[in-house]
Protein backbone atom coordinates (compact mmCIF):
# COMPACT_ATOMS: atom_id res chain seq x y z
CA UNK A 1 0.00 0.00 0.00
CA UNK A 2 1.38 3.40 -0.98
CA UNK A 3 1.29 6.05 1.72
CA UNK A 4 1.83 9.78 1.99
CA UNK A 5 3.05 11.51 5.13
CA UNK A 6 0.91 14.49 6.07
CA UNK A 7 0.00 16.42 9.15
CA UNK A 8 -3.54 15.94 10.38
CA UNK A 9 -4.45 19.43 9.13
CA UNK A 10 -2.93 18.77 5.71
CA UNK A 11 -4.89 15.52 5.48
CA UNK A 12 -8.17 17.33 6.28
CA UNK A 13 -7.53 19.85 3.51
CA UNK A 14 -6.45 17.24 0.97
CA UNK A 15 -9.50 15.10 1.70
CA UNK A 16 -11.79 18.10 1.27
CA UNK A 17 -10.25 18.88 -2.10
CA UNK A 18 -10.80 15.28 -3.25
CA UNK A 19 -14.56 15.51 -2.69
CA UNK A 20 -16.63 16.43 -5.75
CA UNK A 21 -20.35 16.71 -6.40
CA UNK A 22 -22.47 16.31 -9.51
CA UNK A 23 -24.79 19.29 -10.06
CA UNK A 24 -27.02 19.22 -13.14
CA UNK A 25 -24.53 17.00 -14.93
CA UNK A 26 -21.49 19.11 -14.03
CA UNK A 27 -18.78 17.94 -11.63
CA UNK A 28 -17.94 20.63 -9.07
CA UNK A 29 -15.98 20.82 -5.82
CA UNK A 30 -18.07 19.77 -2.85
CA UNK A 31 -16.10 22.32 -0.82
CA UNK A 32 -15.64 25.45 -2.98
CA UNK A 33 -14.01 27.43 -0.18
CA UNK A 34 -13.17 27.86 3.48
CA UNK A 35 -13.98 30.77 5.76
CA UNK A 36 -11.24 31.39 8.31
CA UNK A 37 -10.34 33.68 11.17
CA UNK A 38 -7.00 32.49 12.50
CA UNK A 39 -5.76 32.44 16.05
CA UNK A 40 -3.29 30.42 18.05
CA UNK A 41 -5.60 27.39 17.91
CA UNK A 42 -5.56 27.00 14.11
CA UNK A 43 -3.08 29.36 12.46
CA UNK A 44 0.03 27.12 12.55
CA UNK A 45 -1.74 23.85 11.78
CA UNK A 46 -4.79 24.33 9.61
CA UNK A 47 -3.64 27.77 8.50
CA UNK A 48 -0.42 26.39 7.01
CA UNK A 49 -2.34 23.58 5.29
CA UNK A 50 -4.83 26.01 3.76
CA UNK A 51 -2.00 28.24 2.56
CA UNK A 52 -0.49 25.36 0.62
CA UNK A 53 -3.87 24.68 -1.01
CA UNK A 54 -4.90 28.30 -1.60
CA UNK A 55 -4.88 28.08 -5.42
CA UNK A 56 -7.36 25.18 -5.42
CA UNK A 57 -9.29 25.69 -2.20
CA UNK A 58 -9.77 29.46 -1.60
CA UNK A 59 -9.66 30.77 1.96
CA UNK A 60 -11.87 33.77 2.74
CA UNK A 61 -11.08 36.02 5.67
CA UNK A 62 -14.09 37.44 7.54
CA UNK A 63 -14.52 39.95 10.36
CA UNK A 64 -16.71 37.91 12.70
CA UNK A 65 -16.81 34.15 13.22
CA UNK A 66 -20.59 33.99 13.51
CA UNK A 67 -20.93 36.20 10.45
CA UNK A 68 -18.70 34.05 8.26
CA UNK A 69 -20.62 30.96 9.30
CA UNK A 70 -23.90 32.68 8.38
CA UNK A 71 -22.40 33.41 4.96
CA UNK A 72 -21.51 29.73 4.61
CA UNK A 73 -25.04 28.69 5.58
CA UNK A 74 -26.62 31.11 3.11
CA UNK A 75 -24.32 29.86 0.36
CA UNK A 76 -25.41 26.26 0.90
CA UNK A 77 -29.10 27.16 1.11
CA UNK A 78 -28.98 29.18 -2.10
CA UNK A 79 -27.42 26.24 -3.93
CA UNK A 80 -30.03 23.84 -2.52
CA UNK A 81 -27.43 22.11 -0.30
CA UNK A 82 -25.38 20.87 -3.26
CA UNK A 83 -22.12 22.56 -2.18
CA UNK A 84 -20.71 23.14 1.29
CA UNK A 85 -18.47 25.77 2.86
CA UNK A 86 -16.13 25.02 5.76
CA UNK A 87 -15.47 27.44 8.65
CA UNK A 88 -12.50 27.46 10.96
CA UNK A 89 -11.78 29.58 14.00
CA UNK A 90 -9.37 29.46 16.87
CA UNK A 91 -9.95 27.71 20.18
CA UNK A 92 -11.94 29.69 22.71
CA UNK A 93 -14.22 32.62 21.79
CA UNK A 94 -13.50 32.29 18.09
CA UNK A 95 -14.93 28.79 18.15
CA UNK A 96 -17.89 29.51 20.42
CA UNK A 97 -18.81 32.51 18.29
CA UNK A 98 -19.77 29.95 15.65
CA UNK A 99 -22.10 27.96 17.93
CA UNK A 100 -25.10 30.20 17.23
CA UNK A 101 -24.55 29.79 13.51
CA UNK A 102 -24.28 26.03 13.98
CA UNK A 103 -27.72 26.16 15.57
CA UNK A 104 -29.03 28.09 12.55
CA UNK A 105 -27.69 25.38 10.25
CA UNK A 106 -29.03 22.58 12.45
CA UNK A 107 -32.57 23.94 12.66
CA UNK A 108 -32.68 24.63 8.94
CA UNK A 109 -31.07 21.28 7.97
CA UNK A 110 -28.25 23.03 6.10
CA UNK A 111 -24.71 21.67 5.62
CA UNK A 112 -21.67 23.48 7.01
CA UNK A 113 -18.35 21.95 8.07
CA UNK A 114 -17.11 23.53 11.30
CA UNK A 115 -13.40 23.07 12.05
CA UNK A 116 -12.80 24.83 15.37
CA UNK A 117 -9.37 24.73 16.93
CA UNK A 118 -9.27 22.98 20.29
CA UNK A 119 -7.02 22.85 23.33
CA UNK A 120 -3.92 20.63 23.47
CA UNK A 121 -4.76 16.92 23.40
CA UNK A 122 -1.48 16.20 25.20
CA UNK A 123 -2.44 18.69 27.95
CA UNK A 124 1.24 19.48 28.38
CA UNK A 125 0.90 23.30 28.50
CA UNK A 126 -2.52 23.37 30.19
CA UNK A 127 -4.23 25.65 30.89
CA UNK A 128 -3.53 27.48 27.65
CA UNK A 129 -4.83 30.88 26.65
CA UNK A 130 -8.63 30.82 26.14
CA UNK A 131 -9.00 27.32 27.56
CA UNK A 132 -12.19 26.68 29.53
CA UNK A 133 -11.20 24.32 32.33
CA UNK A 134 -13.89 21.96 33.53
CA UNK A 135 -13.42 21.03 37.18
CA UNK A 136 -15.05 17.59 37.06
CA UNK A 137 -14.34 16.39 33.49
CA UNK A 138 -11.03 17.17 31.82
CA UNK A 139 -12.24 15.77 28.50
CA UNK A 140 -14.65 18.70 28.10
CA UNK A 141 -13.68 21.86 26.24
CA UNK A 142 -15.70 24.84 25.08
CA UNK A 143 -16.11 23.05 21.75
CA UNK A 144 -18.48 20.61 23.43
CA UNK A 145 -21.02 23.44 23.03
CA UNK A 146 -21.24 22.33 19.41
CA UNK A 147 -22.60 18.89 20.30
CA UNK A 148 -26.31 19.74 20.63
CA UNK A 149 -26.24 21.85 17.46
CA UNK A 150 -24.31 19.46 15.22
CA UNK A 151 -25.67 16.53 13.27
CA UNK A 152 -22.25 14.90 13.61
CA UNK A 153 -19.50 15.76 16.11
CA UNK A 154 -16.02 14.36 16.60
CA UNK A 155 -12.85 15.46 18.34
CA UNK A 156 -9.74 14.31 16.49
CA UNK A 157 -7.23 13.35 19.15
CA UNK A 158 -5.03 11.22 16.87
CA UNK A 159 -4.26 12.02 13.21
CA UNK A 160 -5.20 8.51 12.07
CA UNK A 161 -8.74 9.03 13.39
CA UNK A 162 -9.45 10.99 10.21
CA UNK A 163 -9.59 7.69 8.31
CA UNK A 164 -12.94 6.90 9.92
CA UNK A 165 -14.16 10.38 10.85
CA UNK A 166 -13.92 12.27 7.56
CA UNK A 167 -16.03 9.81 5.53
CA UNK A 168 -18.75 10.01 8.19
CA UNK A 169 -18.59 13.80 8.18
CA UNK A 170 -19.02 13.99 4.42
CA UNK A 171 -21.79 11.39 4.53
CA UNK A 172 -23.84 13.62 6.83
CA UNK A 173 -23.14 16.78 4.80
CA UNK A 174 -24.41 15.13 1.61
CA UNK A 175 -27.24 12.99 2.97
CA UNK A 176 -30.78 14.28 2.16
CA UNK A 177 -32.15 13.01 5.47
CA UNK A 178 -29.33 13.68 7.93
CA UNK A 179 -28.06 16.86 6.27
CA UNK A 180 -26.89 19.49 8.72
CA UNK A 181 -23.82 20.96 10.37
CA UNK A 182 -20.78 18.80 11.08
CA UNK A 183 -18.20 19.75 13.70
CA UNK A 184 -14.70 18.30 13.83
CA UNK A 185 -12.89 19.76 16.82
CA UNK A 186 -9.17 19.90 16.02
CA UNK A 187 -6.75 20.17 18.96
CA UNK A 188 -4.03 22.58 17.95
CA UNK A 189 -1.18 20.16 18.69
CA UNK A 190 -2.79 17.24 16.82
CA UNK A 191 -3.27 19.46 13.76
CA UNK A 192 0.53 19.44 13.45
CA UNK A 193 1.09 15.73 14.14
CA UNK A 194 1.98 13.63 11.07
CA UNK A 195 0.81 10.20 9.93
CA UNK A 196 1.44 7.97 6.93
CA UNK A 197 -1.97 8.07 5.26
CA UNK A 198 -2.94 5.59 2.49
CA UNK A 199 -2.83 7.43 -0.83
CA UNK A 200 -6.18 5.94 -1.85
CA UNK A 201 -7.80 7.83 1.04
CA UNK A 202 -7.41 10.96 -1.08
CA UNK A 203 -8.78 9.52 -4.33
CA UNK A 204 -11.37 11.77 -5.96
CA UNK A 205 -14.93 10.89 -5.00
CA UNK A 206 -18.00 12.23 -6.78
CA UNK A 207 -21.11 12.54 -4.63
CA UNK A 208 -24.55 12.33 -6.19
CA UNK A 209 -27.86 13.08 -4.57
CA UNK A 210 -29.46 9.93 -3.19
CA UNK A 211 -33.17 9.66 -4.01
CA UNK A 212 -35.40 7.38 -1.98
CA UNK A 213 -38.60 6.13 -3.61
CA UNK A 214 -41.74 5.94 -1.51
CA UNK A 215 -42.81 2.60 -0.11
CA UNK A 216 -45.45 1.08 -2.39
CA UNK A 217 -47.93 0.52 0.45
CA UNK A 218 -47.52 4.05 1.78
CA UNK A 219 -47.97 5.39 -1.73
CA UNK A 220 -51.16 3.38 -2.27
CA UNK A 221 -52.53 4.60 1.07
CA UNK A 222 -51.70 8.18 0.10
CA UNK A 223 -53.45 7.88 -3.25
CA UNK A 224 -56.53 6.50 -1.53
CA UNK A 225 -56.50 9.36 0.99
CA UNK A 226 -56.23 12.00 -1.73
CA UNK A 227 -58.98 10.43 -3.83
CA UNK A 228 -61.36 10.76 -0.88
CA UNK A 229 -60.67 14.49 -0.55
CA UNK A 230 -62.92 17.23 -1.90
CA UNK A 231 -61.05 20.22 -0.50
CA UNK A 232 -57.31 19.50 -0.58
CA UNK A 233 -54.63 22.10 0.11
CA UNK A 234 -50.93 21.61 -0.65
CA UNK A 235 -48.30 23.19 1.60
CA UNK A 236 -44.93 23.54 -0.12
CA UNK A 237 -41.89 23.58 2.16
CA UNK A 238 -38.15 23.90 1.76
CA UNK A 239 -37.76 20.22 0.98
CA UNK A 240 -39.43 20.78 -2.38
CA UNK A 241 -36.54 23.10 -3.27
CA UNK A 242 -33.79 20.86 -1.93
CA UNK A 243 -35.15 17.86 -3.80
CA UNK A 244 -35.34 19.80 -7.06
CA UNK A 245 -39.01 18.81 -7.17
CA UNK A 246 -40.45 22.09 -8.42
CA UNK A 247 -41.32 20.84 -11.94
CA UNK A 248 -43.10 17.84 -10.45
CA UNK A 249 -44.94 20.05 -7.96
CA UNK A 250 -46.06 22.31 -10.81
CA UNK A 251 -47.27 19.33 -12.84
CA UNK A 252 -49.23 17.85 -9.93
CA UNK A 253 -51.00 21.00 -8.79
CA UNK A 254 -51.67 22.29 -12.30
CA UNK A 255 -53.15 19.02 -13.58
CA UNK A 256 -55.40 18.55 -10.56
CA UNK A 257 -56.02 22.26 -9.79
CA UNK A 258 -54.72 22.05 -6.24
CA UNK A 259 -54.26 25.31 -4.32
CA UNK A 260 -50.75 25.72 -2.87
CA UNK A 261 -49.69 27.64 0.22
CA UNK A 262 -45.97 28.24 0.76
CA UNK A 263 -43.99 28.23 3.99
CA UNK A 264 -41.11 30.64 4.59
CA UNK A 265 -38.64 28.02 3.32
CA UNK A 266 -40.97 26.93 0.52
CA UNK A 267 -41.68 30.37 -0.91
CA UNK A 268 -40.72 30.50 -4.58
CA UNK A 269 -41.69 26.86 -5.14
CA UNK A 270 -44.20 28.26 -7.63
CA UNK A 271 -44.03 31.67 -9.34
CA UNK A 272 -46.12 34.17 -7.38
CA UNK A 273 -48.53 34.58 -10.31
CA UNK A 274 -49.00 30.84 -10.87
CA UNK A 275 -52.71 30.03 -11.02
CA UNK A 276 -52.44 27.57 -8.12
CA UNK A 277 -50.28 29.72 -5.82
CA UNK A 278 -52.58 31.12 -3.13
CA UNK A 279 -49.74 32.77 -1.25
CA UNK A 280 -47.94 32.11 1.99
CA UNK A 281 -49.45 30.24 4.89
CA UNK A 282 -49.38 30.45 8.66
CA UNK A 283 -48.80 33.04 11.35
CA UNK A 284 -47.25 35.40 8.83
CA UNK A 285 -49.21 34.05 5.89
CA UNK A 286 -51.75 35.58 3.57
CA UNK A 287 -55.51 35.63 3.92
CA UNK A 288 -56.15 33.27 0.99
CA UNK A 289 -54.00 30.33 2.08
CA UNK A 290 -55.05 30.64 5.71
CA UNK A 291 -58.75 30.75 4.84
CA UNK A 292 -58.36 27.62 2.76
CA UNK A 293 -56.43 25.87 5.53
CA UNK A 294 -59.34 26.49 7.91
CA UNK A 295 -61.74 24.69 5.54
CA UNK A 296 -59.58 22.06 3.85
CA UNK A 297 -60.41 18.40 4.38
CA UNK A 298 -56.89 17.29 3.42
CA UNK A 299 -53.51 18.96 3.85
CA UNK A 300 -50.76 17.62 1.60
CA UNK A 301 -47.51 18.81 3.19
CA UNK A 302 -44.50 18.57 0.88
CA UNK A 303 -41.05 18.84 2.46
CA UNK A 304 -42.06 20.78 5.56
CA UNK A 305 -41.82 19.99 9.25
CA UNK A 306 -44.86 22.22 9.87
CA UNK A 307 -43.33 24.40 12.53
CA UNK A 308 -45.56 26.62 14.59
CA UNK A 309 -45.42 29.52 12.13
CA UNK A 310 -46.56 27.32 9.24
CA UNK A 311 -49.34 25.62 11.21
CA UNK A 312 -50.53 28.67 13.15
CA UNK A 313 -49.37 26.91 16.31
CA UNK A 314 -51.71 24.03 15.34
CA UNK A 315 -54.77 26.28 15.73
CA UNK A 316 -55.21 27.45 12.13
CA UNK A 317 -55.80 24.22 10.20
CA UNK A 318 -59.24 22.63 10.14
CA UNK A 319 -59.14 20.18 13.08
CA UNK A 320 -61.13 17.65 11.03
CA UNK A 321 -58.70 17.73 8.10
CA UNK A 322 -56.50 14.75 7.34
CA UNK A 323 -52.77 15.34 6.89
CA UNK A 324 -50.58 13.62 4.32
CA UNK A 325 -46.92 14.40 5.01
CA UNK A 326 -44.49 13.84 2.13
CA UNK A 327 -40.97 14.03 3.48
CA UNK A 328 -37.63 12.35 2.91
CA UNK A 329 -37.18 12.26 6.71
CA UNK A 330 -39.51 10.02 8.68
CA UNK A 331 -38.71 12.18 11.73
CA UNK A 332 -40.67 15.00 10.10
CA UNK A 333 -43.26 12.90 8.30
CA UNK A 334 -44.86 11.60 11.50
CA UNK A 335 -45.47 15.02 13.06
CA UNK A 336 -48.96 16.42 13.66
CA UNK A 337 -50.50 12.92 13.61
CA UNK A 338 -49.98 12.91 9.87
CA UNK A 339 -50.13 9.97 7.49
CA UNK A 340 -46.54 9.45 6.40
CA UNK A 341 -45.37 9.21 2.83
CA UNK A 342 -41.61 8.92 3.25
CA UNK A 343 -39.59 9.51 0.14
CA UNK A 344 -37.81 11.97 -2.08
CA UNK A 345 -40.24 14.72 -3.10
CA UNK A 346 -39.26 14.65 -6.78
CA UNK A 347 -39.93 10.92 -7.14
CA UNK A 348 -42.95 10.91 -4.86
CA UNK A 349 -44.80 13.80 -6.49
CA UNK A 350 -44.22 12.22 -9.89
CA UNK A 351 -45.78 8.99 -8.62
CA UNK A 352 -48.80 10.89 -7.33
CA UNK A 353 -49.28 12.56 -10.71
CA UNK A 354 -49.48 9.17 -12.38
CA UNK A 355 -51.62 7.57 -9.69
CA UNK A 356 -54.37 10.20 -9.45
CA UNK A 357 -55.54 10.06 -13.05
CA UNK A 358 -59.31 10.62 -13.22
CA UNK A 359 -59.59 12.34 -9.82
CA UNK A 360 -60.18 16.01 -9.15
CA UNK A 361 -61.22 18.16 -6.20
CA UNK A 362 -64.67 19.71 -5.92
CA UNK A 363 -65.35 22.41 -8.53
CA UNK A 364 -66.57 24.76 -5.79
CA UNK A 365 -63.22 24.39 -3.98
CA UNK A 366 -61.27 25.26 -7.12
CA UNK A 367 -63.47 28.31 -7.67
CA UNK A 368 -63.17 29.40 -4.03
CA UNK A 369 -59.38 29.16 -4.16
CA UNK A 370 -59.26 31.27 -7.32
CA UNK A 371 -61.48 33.96 -5.81
CA UNK A 372 -59.47 34.11 -2.58
CA UNK A 373 -56.23 34.26 -4.54
CA UNK A 374 -57.48 37.20 -6.62
CA UNK A 375 -58.67 39.04 -3.50
CA UNK A 376 -55.32 38.49 -1.79
CA UNK A 377 -53.35 39.78 -4.77
CA UNK A 378 -55.50 42.92 -4.71
CA UNK A 379 -54.62 43.30 -1.02
CA UNK A 380 -50.90 42.97 -1.76
CA UNK A 381 -51.18 45.66 -4.45
CA UNK A 382 -52.91 47.96 -1.99
CA UNK A 383 -50.69 47.59 1.07
CA UNK A 384 -47.37 47.75 -0.83
CA UNK A 385 -48.23 50.95 -2.69
CA UNK A 386 -46.62 54.25 -1.71
CA UNK A 387 -49.20 55.93 0.51
CA UNK A 388 -47.19 59.11 0.81
CA UNK A 389 -47.08 58.92 4.60
CA UNK A 390 -44.47 60.93 6.47
CA UNK A 391 -43.13 57.78 8.13
CA UNK A 392 -43.55 54.78 5.82
CA UNK A 393 -44.48 51.33 7.11
CA UNK A 394 -42.54 48.15 6.40
CA UNK A 395 -45.04 47.06 3.73
CA UNK A 396 -44.42 50.21 1.68
CA UNK A 397 -40.67 49.63 1.85
CA UNK A 398 -41.13 45.98 0.83
CA UNK A 399 -43.17 47.14 -2.14
CA UNK A 400 -40.50 49.59 -3.27
CA UNK A 401 -37.70 47.05 -3.03
CA UNK A 402 -39.80 44.38 -4.76
CA UNK A 403 -40.51 46.72 -7.66
CA UNK A 404 -36.79 47.46 -7.98
CA UNK A 405 -35.80 43.79 -8.01
CA UNK A 406 -35.36 42.03 -11.34
CA UNK A 407 -36.65 38.59 -12.31
CA UNK A 408 -33.49 36.79 -11.12
CA UNK A 409 -32.80 38.93 -8.07
CA UNK A 410 -32.96 37.75 -4.45
CA UNK A 411 -34.23 39.23 -1.19
CA UNK A 412 -32.59 38.16 2.09
CA UNK A 413 -33.94 38.54 5.62
CA UNK A 414 -34.13 36.69 8.92
CA UNK A 415 -35.70 38.28 11.99
CA UNK A 416 -38.01 40.93 13.42
CA UNK A 417 -41.18 42.18 11.77
CA UNK A 418 -39.83 42.01 8.23
CA UNK A 419 -40.16 38.22 7.79
CA UNK A 420 -43.90 38.55 8.29
CA UNK A 421 -44.28 41.35 5.79
CA UNK A 422 -41.98 39.67 3.29
CA UNK A 423 -43.65 36.27 3.47
CA UNK A 424 -47.03 37.87 2.87
CA UNK A 425 -46.05 40.49 0.33
CA UNK A 426 -42.86 39.68 -1.57
CA UNK A 427 -43.47 38.47 -5.10
CA UNK A 428 -40.97 36.35 -6.99
CA UNK A 429 -40.99 34.17 -10.07
CA UNK A 430 -37.40 33.04 -9.41
CA UNK A 431 -37.34 29.84 -7.35
CA UNK A 432 -34.37 31.14 -5.32
CA UNK A 433 -35.62 34.73 -5.28
CA UNK A 434 -36.69 34.61 -1.64
CA UNK A 435 -34.12 33.75 1.02
CA UNK A 436 -35.43 33.76 4.57
CA UNK A 437 -33.70 32.26 7.61
CA UNK A 438 -36.76 31.67 9.75
CA UNK A 439 -36.14 28.28 11.30
CA UNK A 440 -33.95 29.90 13.97
CA UNK A 441 -34.85 33.52 13.09
CA UNK A 442 -31.37 34.65 14.00
CA UNK A 443 -30.88 38.39 14.31
CA UNK A 444 -27.61 39.30 12.64
CA UNK A 445 -27.94 36.72 9.89
CA UNK A 446 -29.14 39.17 7.27
CA UNK A 447 -26.04 41.03 6.09
CA UNK A 448 -23.68 38.08 6.38
CA UNK A 449 -26.27 35.85 4.76
CA UNK A 450 -26.60 38.31 1.91
CA UNK A 451 -22.88 37.98 1.30
CA UNK A 452 -23.17 34.19 1.10
CA UNK A 453 -26.14 34.43 -1.26
CA UNK A 454 -24.22 36.77 -3.55
CA UNK A 455 -21.25 34.39 -3.61
CA UNK A 456 -23.60 31.59 -4.66
CA UNK A 457 -25.50 33.67 -7.25
CA UNK A 458 -23.07 36.34 -8.47
CA UNK A 459 -25.28 37.30 -11.45
CA UNK A 460 -28.23 38.24 -9.22
CA UNK A 461 -28.69 41.49 -7.36
CA UNK A 462 -29.04 40.61 -3.68
CA UNK A 463 -31.32 42.87 -1.62
CA UNK A 464 -30.81 42.53 2.12
CA UNK A 465 -33.70 43.92 4.15
CA UNK A 466 -32.69 44.42 7.76
CA UNK A 467 -34.03 46.24 10.79
CA UNK A 468 -31.96 48.59 12.91
CA UNK A 469 -31.78 46.00 15.70
CA UNK A 470 -30.31 43.24 13.54
CA UNK A 471 -27.97 45.68 11.81
CA UNK A 472 -26.49 46.74 15.14
CA UNK A 473 -26.08 43.12 16.23
CA UNK A 474 -23.89 42.05 13.31
CA UNK A 475 -22.84 44.33 10.48
CA UNK A 476 -19.12 43.68 9.99
CA UNK A 477 -19.52 41.53 6.90
CA UNK A 478 -20.45 44.66 4.96
CA UNK A 479 -16.71 45.32 5.03
CA UNK A 480 -16.07 41.73 3.93
CA UNK A 481 -18.44 42.11 0.98
CA UNK A 482 -16.54 45.23 -0.13
CA UNK A 483 -13.19 43.52 0.39
CA UNK A 484 -14.17 40.46 -1.65
CA UNK A 485 -16.04 42.39 -4.33
CA UNK A 486 -19.36 40.66 -3.69
CA UNK A 487 -21.85 43.51 -3.87
CA UNK A 488 -24.98 43.48 -1.76
CA UNK A 489 -27.71 46.11 -1.57
CA UNK A 490 -28.90 46.60 2.01
CA UNK A 491 -32.02 48.51 3.03
CA UNK A 492 -31.97 49.35 6.74
CA UNK A 493 -35.41 50.03 8.21
CA UNK A 494 -34.90 52.10 11.35
CA UNK A 495 -37.87 52.08 13.71
CA UNK A 496 -35.75 52.93 16.75
CA UNK A 497 -35.93 49.59 18.52
CA UNK A 498 -37.32 46.09 18.38
CA UNK A 499 -40.65 47.07 16.86
CA UNK A 500 -41.86 43.52 16.22
CA UNK A 501 -41.42 42.39 19.83
CA UNK A 502 -42.83 45.71 21.06
CA UNK A 503 -46.04 44.98 19.15
CA UNK A 504 -46.09 41.41 20.47
CA UNK A 505 -45.53 42.70 24.01
CA UNK A 506 -48.54 44.99 23.69
CA UNK A 507 -50.67 42.24 22.12
CA UNK A 508 -49.94 40.14 25.21
CA UNK A 509 -51.14 42.98 27.43
CA UNK A 510 -47.77 44.37 28.43
CA UNK A 511 -46.73 48.01 28.43
CA UNK A 512 -43.96 49.30 26.22
CA UNK A 513 -40.87 48.11 28.10
CA UNK A 514 -37.23 47.60 27.08
CA UNK A 515 -37.92 47.08 23.36
CA UNK A 516 -38.23 50.52 21.80
CA UNK A 517 -35.29 52.73 22.67
CA UNK A 518 -37.64 55.30 24.18
CA UNK A 519 -38.83 52.62 26.64
CA UNK A 520 -35.34 51.61 27.80
CA UNK A 521 -33.08 52.86 30.54
CA UNK A 522 -31.00 55.66 28.99
CA UNK A 523 -29.19 58.83 29.90
CA UNK A 524 -31.36 61.92 30.19
CA UNK A 525 -30.80 62.86 26.57
CA UNK A 526 -32.09 59.46 25.41
CA UNK A 527 -30.57 56.86 23.15
CA UNK A 528 -28.50 58.22 20.25
CA UNK A 529 -29.90 58.27 16.72
CA UNK A 530 -27.66 55.91 14.77
CA UNK A 531 -26.45 57.23 11.43
CA UNK A 532 -26.55 53.94 9.54
CA UNK A 533 -25.48 55.52 6.27
CA UNK A 534 -22.38 57.02 7.85
CA UNK A 535 -21.59 53.75 9.60
CA UNK A 536 -21.88 51.74 6.38
CA UNK A 537 -19.67 54.27 4.61
CA UNK A 538 -17.06 53.77 7.31
CA UNK A 539 -17.09 50.06 6.44
CA UNK A 540 -16.36 50.86 2.80
CA UNK A 541 -19.85 50.74 1.29
CA UNK A 542 -21.60 53.48 -0.62
CA UNK A 543 -24.59 54.68 1.34
CA UNK A 544 -27.33 57.25 1.82
CA UNK A 545 -30.25 58.15 4.05
CA UNK A 546 -33.64 58.65 2.39
CA UNK A 547 -36.79 60.26 3.75
CA UNK A 548 -39.67 58.59 1.89
CA UNK A 549 -40.64 55.87 -0.58
CA UNK A 550 -40.14 58.05 -3.64
CA UNK A 551 -36.59 58.83 -2.53
CA UNK A 552 -36.03 55.15 -1.70
CA UNK A 553 -37.00 54.10 -5.22
CA UNK A 554 -34.51 56.57 -6.70
CA UNK A 555 -31.80 55.38 -4.30
CA UNK A 556 -32.43 51.75 -5.26
CA UNK A 557 -31.68 52.59 -8.88
CA UNK A 558 -28.37 54.17 -7.82
CA UNK A 559 -27.64 51.09 -5.73
CA UNK A 560 -28.24 48.76 -8.65
CA UNK A 561 -25.85 50.82 -10.78
CA UNK A 562 -23.14 50.80 -8.10
CA UNK A 563 -20.09 48.58 -8.50
CA UNK A 564 -19.79 47.98 -4.76
CA UNK A 565 -22.03 47.28 -1.77
CA UNK A 566 -24.67 49.93 -1.16
CA UNK A 567 -26.59 50.67 2.03
CA UNK A 568 -29.81 52.70 2.13
CA UNK A 569 -31.27 53.76 5.48
CA UNK A 570 -34.87 54.83 5.94
CA UNK A 571 -36.87 55.66 9.08
CA UNK A 572 -40.06 53.62 9.44
CA UNK A 573 -43.17 53.39 11.60
CA UNK A 574 -42.64 50.94 14.46
CA UNK A 575 -46.34 50.35 15.13
CA UNK A 576 -47.72 49.72 11.65
CA UNK A 577 -47.82 46.21 10.21
CA UNK A 578 -50.03 44.46 7.68
CA UNK A 579 -53.14 43.31 9.51
CA UNK A 580 -54.52 41.43 6.50
CA UNK A 581 -53.82 37.71 6.59
CA UNK A 582 -51.85 35.96 9.30
CA UNK A 583 -53.04 33.76 12.13
CA UNK A 584 -52.63 33.27 15.88
CA UNK A 585 -49.23 32.46 17.34
CA UNK A 586 -48.84 30.66 20.64
CA UNK A 587 -46.93 33.08 22.89
CA UNK A 588 -47.83 32.27 26.48
CA UNK A 589 -49.62 35.00 28.45
CA UNK A 590 -49.41 35.10 32.29
CA UNK A 591 -52.30 33.51 34.17
CA UNK A 592 -52.05 36.13 36.92
CA UNK A 593 -51.38 39.85 36.49
CA UNK A 594 -52.33 43.20 38.03
CA UNK A 595 -52.79 44.61 34.53
CA UNK A 596 -56.29 44.41 33.06
CA UNK A 597 -54.72 44.31 29.60
CA UNK A 598 -52.85 41.11 30.47
CA UNK A 599 -56.00 39.49 31.87
CA UNK A 600 -57.87 40.32 28.65
CA UNK A 601 -55.02 38.93 26.59
CA UNK A 602 -55.08 35.76 28.71
CA UNK A 603 -58.77 35.24 27.97
CA UNK A 604 -58.08 35.57 24.26
CA UNK A 605 -55.12 33.21 24.62
CA UNK A 606 -57.23 30.50 26.25
CA UNK A 607 -59.74 30.68 23.39
CA UNK A 608 -57.02 29.90 20.88
CA UNK A 609 -55.51 27.23 23.12
CA UNK A 610 -58.85 25.42 22.98
CA UNK A 611 -58.64 25.41 19.17
CA UNK A 612 -55.06 24.20 19.38
CA UNK A 613 -56.09 21.33 21.62
CA UNK A 614 -58.47 20.06 18.95
CA UNK A 615 -55.50 19.51 16.61
CA UNK A 616 -53.35 17.55 19.05
Image (tube, rainbow, N blue to C red):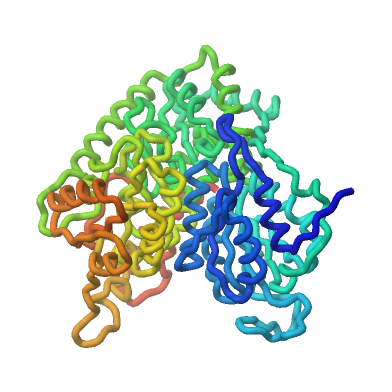
- Estimate the x, y position of residue 228 in percent, counting from the top left: 54, 23
**Residue 465 picture quarter:** bottom left
> Who's the residue at 47% across and 36% down the image?
235
In this rendering, position of residue 548 left or right of residue 158: left
Point out the residue furthest to the right here. Answer: 1
In this rendering, position of residue 346 left or right of residue 360: right
- Up/down of 439 relative to 512, above or below: above
> Who's the residue at 73% across and 74% down the image?
189
- Estimate the x, y position of residue 312 in percent, counting from the top left: 43, 48
> Who's the residue at 69% across and 82% down the image?
134
Point out the residue furthest to the top here. Answer: 358
Between residue 153 and residue 68, name the one nearer to us: 68
In this rendering, position of residue 538 left or right of residue 204: left
Between residue 487 and residue 597, name the one nearer to us: 487
> Who's the residue at 67% across and 68% down the image?
45
Q: Is residue 54 visible?
A: yes
- Estimate the x, y position of residue 90 in percent, counting from the top left: 59, 72
Between residue 391 and residue 575, name the one nearer to us: 391
- Up/down of 140 relative to 202, above or below: below
- Up/down of 337 relative to 45, above or below: above
Between residue 229 and residue 11, name the one nearer to us: 11
Q: Is residue 396 visible?
A: no
**Residue 107 picture quarter:** bottom right
- Estimate the x, y position of residue 582 in percent, counting from the top left: 34, 47
Amino acid sequence: MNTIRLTMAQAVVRYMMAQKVEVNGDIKPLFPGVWAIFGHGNVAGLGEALYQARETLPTYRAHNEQGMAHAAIAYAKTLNRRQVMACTASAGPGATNMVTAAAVAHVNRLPVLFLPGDTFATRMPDPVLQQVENFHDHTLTSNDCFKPVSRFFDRITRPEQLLTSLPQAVRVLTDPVECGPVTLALPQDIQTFAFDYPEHFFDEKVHRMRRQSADRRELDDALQLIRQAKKPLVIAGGGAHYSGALPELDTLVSRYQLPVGETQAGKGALPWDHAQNVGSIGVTGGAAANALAAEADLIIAVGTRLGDFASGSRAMINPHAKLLSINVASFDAVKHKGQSLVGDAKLTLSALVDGLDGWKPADSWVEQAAELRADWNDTVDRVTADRGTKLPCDAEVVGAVNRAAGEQDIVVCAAGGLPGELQKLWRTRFDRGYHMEYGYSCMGYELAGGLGVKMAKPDSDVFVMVGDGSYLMLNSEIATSVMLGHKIIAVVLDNRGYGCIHRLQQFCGGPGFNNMLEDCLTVEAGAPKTDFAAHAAALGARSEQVENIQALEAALERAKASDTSYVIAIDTDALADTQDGGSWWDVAVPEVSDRAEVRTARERYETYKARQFQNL
